Image: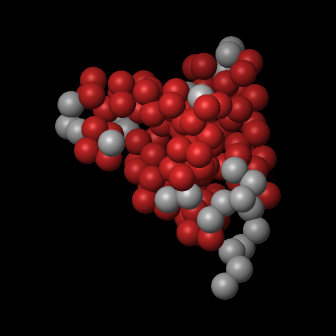
Amino acid sequence: YTQLLESNNYVVRRQSLKLLGEILLERKNFHVMISFIKQSNNLKMIMNALNDRSKSIQYEAFHIFKIFVANPTKTPEVHKILFKNKDKLVKFLVDFQNDKNSDEQFRDEKAFLVKEIRKLQPPEN
């Protein structure tokens, strides 16, 4: 799946992110989702997709990124990456796709992520 998400083909990347998001959010795939969000490399890959020049790819990546942030039992590696990038992530999310702010659910999800990221405490060593 990593090869699809890192493809140079825009359509392949966008559709792969969309499909991955749907798979991870499907209740019957709970164990797949947990396995995916435990991996810090997956978080890095999704964070890179958030920075893509395509707003559509960013939007699909956002729906996967929120799963990492919302997870109450983050692995130490995932927690460390999120904490290390805390300020950048908050700034990014505040300005993220404000043209979609008329979508109440999207606006609420962004606000939730900002709140959760701001609450992150330094990782335990």
Q: Is residue 46 above or below residue 84?
A: above
Quadrant occupied by the N terminus: top left
Residue 85 can be seen, yes or no: no
Residue at x 31% of width, y 32% of height: 13
Residue 54 location, x and y as percent?
A: 37, 29
Residue at x 45% of width, y 33% of height: 20
Residue 78 location, x and y as percent?
A: 58, 62
Image label count? 0
The reply, left or right, for residue 72 in relation to residue 100 is: right
Residue 28 location, x and y as percent?
A: 61, 32
Residue 35 can be seen, yes or no: yes
Q: Is residue 40 above or below residue 108?
A: below
The answer to which of 47 and 78 lies nearer the viewer is 78
Quadrant occupied by the C terminus: bottom right
Q: Residue furthest left?
A: 8
Residue 17 location, x and y as percent?
A: 41, 32
The reply, left or right, for residue 15 in relation to residue 73 is: left
Q: Residue furthest top?
A: 102
